Amino acid sequence: MARYTKTTASHSFLEAALVGLEVQKQRIEEQIAEVRTMLGQRAAAGPKKVAAAPAAVAAAPDAAPVGRKRARRKLSEEARKRIAAAQKKRWAAFRKQTGKE
């Protein structure tokens, strides 16, 4: 019969705590994804999940449609020129500061 030692108890306790924390993490990530969906944002890229929890599978039908692309905003010619001029001004200041010009 195996002896029950303090290290065995603490090791199994830590393993149980780790499992509990991973379940909490999964639940929090699902809640974050729901809030992002409500806000209309894309889900942040994170590490791939090894196994999906049953709650995650049940929530899949409510998830945002896949494959939708957001329309790009169109800048006017005037706006593009202002942006280009501002960028040229920043680069000129940078070159002047570093002595490259």
Image: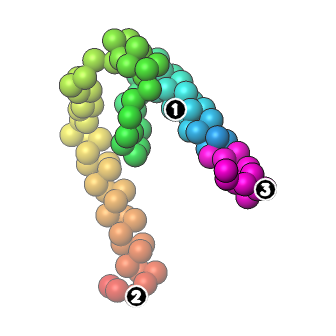
- In the rendered structure, the answer to whether residue 3 lies left or right of residue 49 reads right
Which type of secondary structure does the marked residue at label 1 adopt? helix
| Residue position for label 2 | 99
Upstream in the sequence, badge 2 or badge 3?
3
Picture quadrant of residue 57? top left
**Magenta part of the chain:** 1-15
Q: Which amino acid does label 1 sit on?
A: Gln
Q: Of the numbered discs in the image, which one, if any, rests on residue 6?
A: 3
Q: Please determine whether, in this image, residue 64 is positioned above or below residue 9.
A: above
Magenta span contains residue 8: yes
Q: Which amino acid does label 2 sit on?
A: Gly
Q: How many marks?
A: 3
User: How far from the left and from the top, in percent, is residue 93?
Assistant: 42, 72
Q: What residue type is labelled 3?
A: Lys
At 41% from the left and 15% from the top, the residue drawn is: 59
Mark 3: few/some/many CA within 10 Å (<14, 14-19, 20+)? few
User: Closest to the observer: 40 or 101?
Assistant: 40
User: How far from the left and from the top, in percent, is residue 82?
Assistant: 32, 48
- Give the distance between the C-alpha atoms of the residues marked 3 and 1, in whole angstroms: 30 Å
- Give the distance between the C-alpha atoms of the residues marked 2 and 1, in whole angstroms: 52 Å
Instruction: Name the residue at the bottom extreme.
Output: 99
| Residue position for label 1 | 26
Picture quadrant of residue 8? bottom right
